């Protein structure tokens, strides 16, 4: 599929990181987004702002990846550590999508310009150029995450996840008969 991907720009400061998402945030950009957030977490950034003023739309795969990181960033009860994913300048449609999927509570939301104190580095990460198998796996994991987070999403995504799981098996060269003989994981 030749779907245009969202452009990602990363700005890091001393105490937080900001990822600006421009364009349509879809399944094709979800692997790049997940890679960027994973790398920021690995580098110790526990507070990440996702700047969305130039993001018109997110598909369910991208939303599932975002929700996974929102869940991971939530501080444990009684934990005072300032850890969060903040969605900045999300349009009304994006907020409504997050609310309808039952995942808006995973994020802090705000409006306004991102401001930082101290030294700032800005970069545009190189695209990962994921294979069809990687895209399918990422989409399957994202939809399963949305279903795990909100039981109402099961009805929305059960057919999609079944199709993605079957497609992934085909891409991996696993037939349904082979799958039944594999040990349970």
Image (spheres, grey):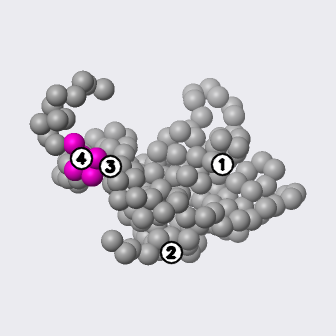
Do callouts 2 and 4 mark residues in contact (Cβ within 8 Å)? no
Asked if marks 1 and 4 touch (Cβ < 8 Å), the reply is no
Sort mark 3 into few (<14), some (14-19) or many (20+) by Cα contacts within 10 Å: many
Residue 4: quadrant of the picture: bottom left
In the rendered structure, does residue 96 fall within the stretch colored magenta? no
Instruction: State the CA–CA distance, disc 2 to disc 1.
Output: 21 Å
* Mark 4 or 3, nearer chain start: 3
* Foreground disc of the pair 3, 2: 3
Residue 176, which numbered label? none
Q: Name the residue that disc number 2 marks.
A: 23
Q: Quadrant of the N terminus?
A: bottom left
Instruction: Say which residue label 1 marks.
Output: 40
Q: Seen in the image, is 125 located left or right of residue 91?
A: right
Is residue 48 positioned above or below 111 on the image?
A: above
Marks 4/3: CA distance?
A: 17 Å
Residue 173, numbered label: 4
Earlier-in-chain disc, 2 versus 4: 2
Query: Dot 2, how many residues are within 10 Å of its Cα: few (below 14), some (14-19), or many (20+)?
Result: some
């Amino acid at each position: 599929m030749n779907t245009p991907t969202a452009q990602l720009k990363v700005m890091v400061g001393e105490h937080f990181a900001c990822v600006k998402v421009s364009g349509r945030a879809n399944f094709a950009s979800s692997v790049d987004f997940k890679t960027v957030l994973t790398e920021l977490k690995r580098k110790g950034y526990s507070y990440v702002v996702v700047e969305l003023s130039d993001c018109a739309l997110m598909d369910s795969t991208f939303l599932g990846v975002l929700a996974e990181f929102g869940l991971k960033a939530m501080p444990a009860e009684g934990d005072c550590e300032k850890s969060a994913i903040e969605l900045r300048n999300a349009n009304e449609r994006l907020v409504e999508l997050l609310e309808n999927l039952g995942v808006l509570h995973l994020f802090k939301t705000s409006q306004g310009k991102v401001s930082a104190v101290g030294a700032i580095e800005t970069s545009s990460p190189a695209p990962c150029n994921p294979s069809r198998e990687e895209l399918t796996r990422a989409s399957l994991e994202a939809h399963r995450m949305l279903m795990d987070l909100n039981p109402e999403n099961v009805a929305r995504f059960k057919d999609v996840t079944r199709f993605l799981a079957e497609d992934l098996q085909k891409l991996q060269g696993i037939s349904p008969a082979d799958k039944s003989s594999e040990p349970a994981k």
